[in-house]
Amino acid sequence: MSSNTLQFDIDGELSKALKYHRSGQLEKAERICKNILEITPHHSASWHVLGIIAHETGKNDAAANHIKKAIENDPQNPFLYNNLGMVLQKQGKLNQAIRCYQNAVQLNPHIAGVYYNMGNTLRDQGKSDEAISCYQKTLQLKPDYAEAYNNMGGALHDQGKLDEAVSCYQKALQLKPGIAEAHNNMGIAFQDEGKSDEAISCYQKALEIDPSHAEAYKNMGDAFQDQGKSDEAISCYQKALEIEPDPGIDVKRCLLLPVICRSNVSIQKYRKQIIEQIESLQNSSLRLKDPYHSCPKTVLG
């Protein structure tokens, strides 16, 4: 068999593997890539696909090793460094991830997604100024990158620049109205500004888009609590718990009282309710350590 025929066969098999990967048939894609590597052990693209599959199935150690193999055989490919950076970020190896993104930028300084991923990693490190610079570079290269506006809003929010954060969330939603996280994040910013009505409206929009958004229910409960609307707050906390159990929210829900009880009868009613709920928590072996546990502000990317 000629080398040209062999190359043609490998390209055809790789094309099949990519098609299987796109359709979610990961085992078939993996099997083809392994077969290719038995014939051509230095086939970078096959190592790369194996790395992506491992990452998608939660096997990040294997993913990192596979993508490193791909880089050994194709060291001038910036996309390999970008994807290795994403795996390392998932592993919590943030400094190594940053170095990968920097390598990708050195090879090609015009890939918006690399700056976006580097911004996310820098924000994870608490380096909001540097993260914002990366998001700005992302948007210079790709002005319609809605997720970059959302995450830049988060970095500005981290700095306490709430008006600027809201502006970024609004730009993200102008570009892509269906980003539930941007509505949720804008609600948090409004809530931090003391604008609970605006915050509740944002959380409601987030839940219209994604009814399983537990954090939006939790945050809306907090906003109702700020307004003294205990029944509405409890209802929101209960919905959040139905979606995603969280001991901190459970305790918060159980201990929530109205701002002012209307009568002695109401006082007795809520006293009995609190006692029953505390007993329920104790029976569930819950440790009452952090009743006001804060949910993370999840961002895209």
Image (spheres, grey):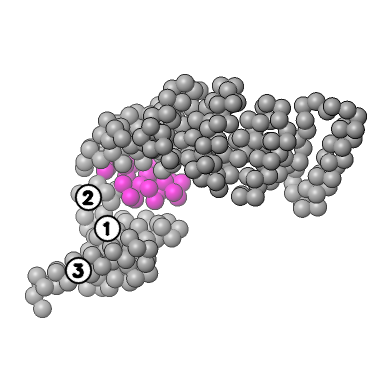
Give how far across and how far down residue 125 sits, in percent: 45, 36
Q: Position of residue 76 (x, y in %)?
A: 20, 49
Q: Residue at x 34, y 50 (%)?
A: 84
The alpha-carbon separation of the residues under discs 1 and 3 comes to 19 Å
Part of the protein shown in magenta: 82-104
Q: Secondary structure at mark 3?
A: helix
CA gap between label 1 and label 2 equals: 9 Å
The residue carrying mark 3 is 12
Q: Regarding mark 2 in the picture, which secondary structure is present there? A: loop
Q: Looking at the magenta stretch, what is its main secondary structure?
A: helix
| Residue 247 on the magenta span | no
**Disc on the earlier residue, 1 or 2:** 1
Q: Would residue 67 be visible to someone looking at this image?
A: yes
Residue pictured at 41% horizontal, 37% vertical = 177
Q: Contact (CB < 8 A) between labels 1 and 2?
A: yes
Q: Nearer the viewer, mark 1 or mark 3?
A: 3
Report the quarter where the C terminus lies. top left
Q: Amino acid at mark 2?
A: Asn
- Front: mark 2 or 3: 3
The quadrant in which residue 178 appears is: top left
Viewer-proximal residue, 216 or 205? 205
Question: Which label's residue is closer to the chain start, 2 or 3?
Answer: 3
> In this figure, which residue is indicated by the disc labeled 2?
77
Quarter of the rendering containing residue 194: top right
Q: Is residue 162 left or right of residue 218?
A: left
- Rendered image: mark on residue 165: none
